[in-house]
Amino acid sequence: MCSARRKKLAVFLCALAAVGLCYAAWVQATGLGVPCLFHALTGLYCPGCGVTRCANALLHGNWRAALQSNAAVLVLFPFFVWLALAAARSYLAHGSVRLTKRQNTAVYVAIAVLVIFGVARNVPALWFLRPPAG
């Protein structure tokens, strides 16, 4: 493993963490998050609607509110962590992100889950999948 790659990865992760914490502080201080353009244009909920509230609830240790805000992202969170670790390991070993066939298949399954969730949360009978107003 190249020490230059380790350094680049560390800088990237620190920058990503800094941006995430700044955004979380901004949302906490102002109550303003990134609005969903899809929801604004169509009135429908996309698979990502409620992610900011989900992440904010997790930062406060409120698992129930996180689940209510975006159940799919919360359930898929361990997968996203696994995928990020696999990508980092691949970058350190090869200098590029090369996912295995199994990892690519898992990504397609996760995309399918998110698409199904996006459709399901707009079905009137499944109203409980929608993020809380607010």
Image (cartoon, rainbow, N blue to C red):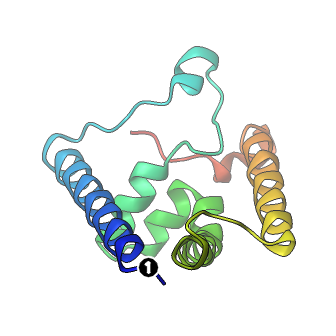
Decide: is 38 above or below 116.
above
The amino acid on which the numbered mark 1 sits, given as a three-letter code, is: Cys
Decide: is 88 above or below 107.
below
Decide: is 131 above or below 124.
below
Residue 18 placement (x, y as % from top left): 22, 59
Q: Which residue is mark 1?
A: 2
Q: Nearer the viewer, residue 31 or 111?
A: 111
Quadrant of the snapshot with the C terminus: top left
Q: Is 57 displayed left or right of 113 in the figure?
A: left
Query: On the image, which quarter does residue 47 sit in?
Result: top right
Residue occupying the point 75% across, 50% down: 117
Q: Is 56 displayed left or right of 97 in the figure?
A: left
Residue occupying the point 36% across, 80% down: 3
Q: Nearer the viewer, residue 4 or 128?
A: 4
Q: Nearer the viewer, residue 125 or 14?
A: 14
- Dot 1 crowding, Cα within 10 Å, few <14, some 14–19, many 20+: few
Helix or strand or loop: what does disc 1 sit on? loop
Residue occupying the point 83% across, 53% down: 112
